[in-house]
Amino acid sequence: MKMSKHAGKRAKQRGMRDDVVNTVLEYGIREKAPGGAEAVMLPHKEGMKRIREKQYEIQLIKLAMGRRMITKDCTVLTVY
């Protein structure tokens, strides 16, 4: 998403990096704002929900590391 000069200036003043802005845009809650705009924020509760989801994904990746599967025609034939 493009950032206006004003938003870029404010982000810099407030120490908000581009990756933080992108995280808010990706995971944030959207609400209508005046003038047909949209307000996006990442409340603490929603942020904690996303952290739990990512932690679960990390656990799954750790469990999957070193595992191997043999597949054919969209069917898992064996796992080890």
Image (spheres, rainbow, N blue to C red):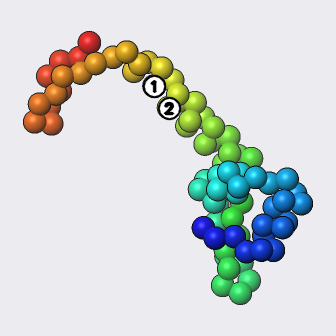
Image x and y of residue 10, in percent: 85, 66
Residue 45, visible in the rendered structure: yes
Label 2 – label 1 distance at C-alpha: 6 Å
Q: What residue type is labelled 1?
A: Ile
In this figure, which residue is indicated by the disc labeled 1? 61
Q: Do the residues labelled 2 and 1 touch (CB within 8 Å)?
A: yes
Quadrant showing the C terminus: top left
Q: Position of residue 55 (x, y in %)?
A: 58, 30
Assign a secondary structure to mark 1. Answer: helix
Left of 43 or right of it: where is 77?
left
Task: Pinpoint residue 78: horizontal percent, then vertical percent.
Answer: 18, 18
Kindly indicate the quadrant of the structure image that contains residue 39.
bottom right
Identified by mark 2, the residue type is Glu
User: Disc 2 marks which residue?
Assistant: 57
Q: How far from the left and from the top, in percent, is residue 5?
A: 77, 74
Numbered-mark total: 2
In the rendered image, is residue 31 in sight? Answer: no
- Rendered residue at 28%/18% (across/down): 68
Residue located 11% across and 30% down the image:
72
